[in-house]
Amino acid sequence: MVSEPGRSPLKRERVREHLMELVEARAPGDPIPSERVLCEQLGVSRPTLRSAVDELVATGLLVREHGRGMFVARAKITQELAPDRDGHRLPQASGTWASRVLEFTTVRAGARVGRRLRISPAAEIAYIARLRLVDGEPMAIEYLHVPAVLVPGLRPADMEAGDFYELLRDRHGLRVREAVQSIEPTVTNEEEARLIGVPVLSPALLFERLTCDDTGRPVEYVHSVYRGDRYRIVSRLTLDVAPDPAGRPARGHHPGIPPGDLAGRGEVPAQMLGDVQPAP
């Protein structure tokens, strides 16, 4: 149904927009007015206000502290994917990154990991689980799988200091060149929630990456669980794209844009923002 001209938007959306304005006008850690004050200012009920507040808490924009009130959350960690001719470059992500090794062992690759690394299921791999921290705060859990033959002498301490890709280059002569990475939503299980300090079943991002060296050989398979309340991905789309050379409108669907909104346009170049930090 189309809204009539001048008709007020839904109350919940109006409350949400007001809260967003408060967040954007304040610095991380700043308080926002109490529920009672906001209800009076906006003329809405407590359930309506709390519904909007709960949404912003779940998405990591607000923090609710029992007995103290509501506060603007710390800024999310962001990394720009800078597009070039062949893909996206990865500038260093914001914040000071560190790692703590949770498990370090040598195991058989198995069928699934072996397929990804293009090695025998019986081949040995270095398996490393590590906690990633930004400015001292837990942000993610990473599970790395590296063919053991490529990294003789690798130690747990190597995975807690410095850049892993620099280590591969300087000590093992492996120059990483490209990676294919997927990102999808997930929720934390009990162990993940405990390690990164969030409630069980909290929203999270599942990253899966296969990294290859300059010969095209897979050197690393990683899957990681990142806190969903501290990360976001932003796409910048160039929409002024001409039809194909024959003048025909493009077919298909661009994610997030209703079918038909880009009728007559071809591929949509995109610049994406978001944390896909390959883990120094």
Image (cartoon, grey):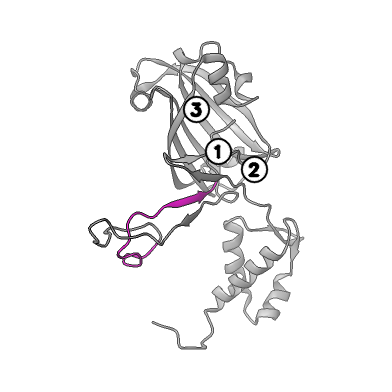
Which of the two marks, 3 or 1, is nearer to us in this view? 1
Task: Check if residue 112 falls in the magenta segment.
Answer: no
Residue holding disc 1: 277
Quadrant in the picture for residue 91: top right
Q: Main secondary structure of the magenta part?
A: loop
Q: Which mark is residue 94?
A: 2
Quadrant in the picture for residue 25: bottom right
* Residue stretch rendered in magenta on the structure: 257-274
- In what quadrant of the picture does the N terminus appear? bottom left
Tag 1 secondary structure: loop
Vertically, is 37 above or below 257? below
Amino acid type of the residue that numbered disc 2 sits on in the rendered structure: Ser
The residue drawn where x is 56% and y is 35% is: 141
Disc nearer the start of the sequence (1/2): 2
The residue drawn where x is 28% and y is 59% is: 250
- Asked if residue 196 lies left or right of residue 210, the reply is right
Tag 2 secondary structure: loop
Amino acid type of the residue that numbered disc 1 sits on in the rendered structure: Gln
